[in-house]
Amino acid sequence: MKKIRIGAIGACSAIFGNVHGDGIINNPDKFELVALCDLNTEKLEKFAERFHVAQTYEDYREMIAKANLDAVVNATPTSSHAVTTIDCLNAGLHVICEKPISMTIEEADAMIDAAKKNNRILQIAVQSRHCDAWKKIRELIRGGRIGTPHTITITQFWDDPYVYNNWRTSAEISGGGIVADSCIHWIDMMRNLMGEITGVFGVGTPSPDSPMPHIEDSSLTLFRFQSGAIGCLRNGWRNVRWPNCNENVEINGTVGTIIGNLMNPWVRKDPQIVELFTVGGNPVGKEVFEFMTSRDRFTAQMADFAECVNGNRLVTCTAEDARRGLQIQQAIYDSYKTKQWQEI
Ligand SMILES: NC(=O)c1ccc[n+]([C@@H]2O[C@H](COP(=O)([O-])OP(=O)(O)OC[C@H]3O[C@@H](n4cnc5c(N)ncnc54)[C@H](O)[C@@H]3O)[C@@H](O)[C@H]2O)c1
């Protein structure tokens, strides 16, 4: 099969440098990384050398016009997602765009329209959907192993000072604080595992020693699902990580419970563990599943994008999913302000 000629906008971003570049390189049968674009021309030369890419551009419009691409990775900050993505789609390119989809619902709608009008793939990058351990959890739920799921708690804690030193803490570029930046992943995962979210109530706050006290870096959100289930999401940028703390889930159902500690190989060498406890035995039944593929989710995500571009698969996280995620994100911020549940 012909390789997809791919370029990157925001190529010098942390996300492209840490994972998307390798996600492309690790799929050599699917992609040819042809061109990199970034406003930071100094860094751009170093990235071009590292990824063995001959063409570099400061202006993405020039890249679109000259590089003869089939697709792009859009790894620019959130406020640039809509304009850059729409220009690429209108130029006939497929796009995998970073989360959150955009700043506003209107922008998301314009992106969705441009993808439809041009018959191009628009996929949003939420890599946990491509993670073996998360996929196992979904399979266990769908397979009825815990009966009817009725509660879910997801926790993600970070202690990385990096997040405070860039545009993430400027709501006019990022769309908010930790909810726009990090919770958005877990809003998507909640929907993916438990079905549609119909109501939210959130509280968020800057931690007492936050270097950026104008935004929330800690948040707690409660969810109500269409199924009648309820959920809780805990996020922090300023938590001391205890072992296994930084990507955890517990799901309770009528006949079982799933407990997952999922990001270990990123942080430590231990495997990701998914435990399934079921009633009916004494002691209760227990199965343990181990994975060492935490970081591989990015390579799997790019492979999935290639399959979608080649027409072999439907998009995993669609732009419509991401639009709904943005709606829920905005409802969480509304509940901060109103101190009320928000029906969505
Ligand atoms: N999926 C994840 O887990 C994850 C993790 C981190 C970041 N992200 C997302 O990735 C995106 C980038 O985040 P980051 O922290 O890596 O950003 P970053 O600040 O490290 O890099 C952004 C880059 O984009 C470039 N840029 C900005 N506007 C541009 C334009 N118009 N044309 C070309 N280049 C432009 C900047 O020069 C910079 O090099 C954001 O949408 C963020 O939400 C996702």
Image (cartoon, helix red, strand yellow):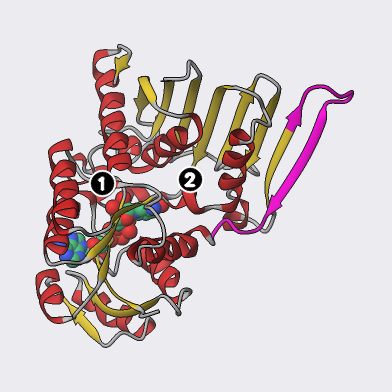
Which kind of residue does numbered mark 1 sit on? Ile
Task: Name the residue located 37 percent from the left edge and 60 percent from the top edge.
Answer: 308
Residue 58, relative to residue 221: is it above or below? Answer: below
Residue 101 has which mark? 1
Q: Quadrant of the N terminus?
A: bottom left
| In this picture, residue 76 sits left or right of residue 265 | left
Between the residue at mark 2 and the residue at mark 1, the CA separation in whole angstroms equals: 25 Å
Residue 159 has which mark? 2
| Label 1: which secondary element | loop
| Quadrant of the image occupied by residue 109 | top left
Q: Nearer the viewer, residue 255 or 273?
A: 255
Per the rendered image, the range of residues in magenta is 277-295
| In this picture, residue 302 sits left or right of residue 79 | right
Q: Quadrant of the C terminus?
A: top left
Task: Name the residue located 50 percent from the left edge and 40 percent from the top edge.
Answer: 157
Residue 78 rendering spot, x and y as whole percentages: 23, 49
| Quadrant of the image occupied by residue 197 | top left
Task: Name the residue located 86 percent from the left edge and 24 percent from the top edge.
Answer: 281
Which kind of residue does numbered mark 2 sit on? Asp
Question: Any magenta on residue 176?
Answer: no
Residue 294 rendering spot, x and y as whole percentages: 57, 56
